[in-house]
Amino acid sequence: MNFFTTLSTVAVMLLYAVPGFILMKTKAVNEEAIRAISKIMLFVCQPCFSVYAFIQLDFSWSFLIQVLIFMAVVIVVQLAIILIFALIHKKRFDEAKNRICVIASAFGNCVFFGAPVLEALLPHFPEAIAFANAYAVAMNLLGWTVGSAIITKDKKYINFKKVIFNPGTIGLLCAIVLYVLKIDFTANIQGSLSLLGRMTTPLSMMVLGMRLATVRIKPIFATPLFYATVLFKQMVLPLIGGFVFSLLPFFTGDVRTTAFILFACPVASIVLNFAELLGDGQEAAADLFLLGTLSSIVTMPTILLLL
């Protein structure tokens, strides 16, 4: 893939962090704003992105089935990685940073990082956005259940209610219903849904800048565990995910490329979002999110050279 296209796309996204940094440093906003923005991204932006990703496409049963299979494969891969890293960190599970590292090793910013990169690198394949959304829903489903249970060390989050009644799943179900019924929306409504869905990118980066303004920089770059987690997530996981999808003959080359790009995305903002919402591991989550996002300007263009 084009190294400089990826590099410039990532660099532009990183610039969105500047306003958040300035707002926090000038005390125009406080840390409570981070939790509020996290809720907006989880409860508003993600569902709207789901609906927009589908309603812009022509209806096809085979495509819908392919998207759902794609989501199932992503769930299996991510769950396997989470379980493996949970075993690795088992003896140190009392420390919040180790629990955060478990979910950070599997969760990537597939919407706010993945969508712009997919649009830049695969302009001929608009369906890639629907697959990015499926990836995000899979990640959110695990985040509201297994991820929340790991962060809090409370198994109550692993239940059927959490699987169905979370913003990501509800948004996807609504999107599928509208897609199957072939309901046409006016250009204004489509534009509004697109705008709300794509707000994830600037909002996530503003949170990055706000967090960068509140944390001590040295610990972020002085913790070997964080480097190892980010290296695995952003350089090794894409190889694992890409290999798994290469074994599945019913996916086209563009879908496999889409999967590889999504697996290569940096540590997900929802790792920090869930830590903020659940009230545990916020500092470690912020450090990993910051390190992963900042390092993505090197890791993402580099790993995508393999495509």
Image (cartoon, rainbow, N blue to C red):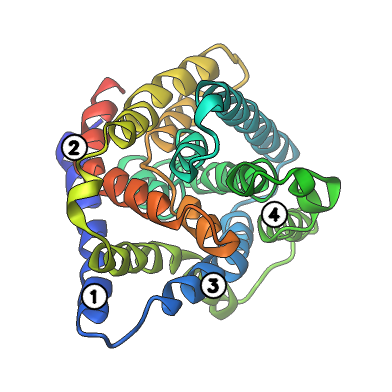
Amino acid found under the numbered disc labelled 2 = Val
**Disc number lying in front (4 or 1):** 1
Residue at position x 56%, y 70% in the image: 39
Q: Secondary structure at mark 4?
A: helix
Q: Is residue 255 left or right of residue 149?
A: left
Residue 16 appearing in the image: no
Amino acid found under the numbered disc labelled 1 = Pro
Picture coordinates of residue 71, whole percent (x, y): 64, 36
Distance (Cα) linking label 4 and label 1: 31 Å
Residue at position x 60%, y 23% in the image: 80
Whether residues under marks 4 and 1 lie with C-beta atoms below 8 angstroms apart, the answer is no
Q: Which residue is mark 3?
A: 40
Distance (Cα) linking label 3 and label 1: 18 Å
**Disc number lying in front (4 or 3):** 3
Relative to residue 93, is residue 77 depicted above or below? above
Q: Which residue is mark 2?
A: 298
Q: Which residue is mark 4?
A: 172
Residue at position x 63%, y 19% in the image: 250
* Nearest to N terminus: mark 3 or mark 1: 1
* Nearest to N terminus: mark 4 or mark 1: 1
* The label number, if any, that marks residue 19 in the structure image: 1
Residue 1 appearing in the image: yes
Distance (Cα) linking label 2 and label 3: 29 Å
Observer-nearest of 132 and 161: 161
* Nearest to N terminus: mark 2 or mark 3: 3
Amino acid found under the numbered disc labelled 3 = Ile
* Nearest to N terminus: mark 1 or mark 2: 1
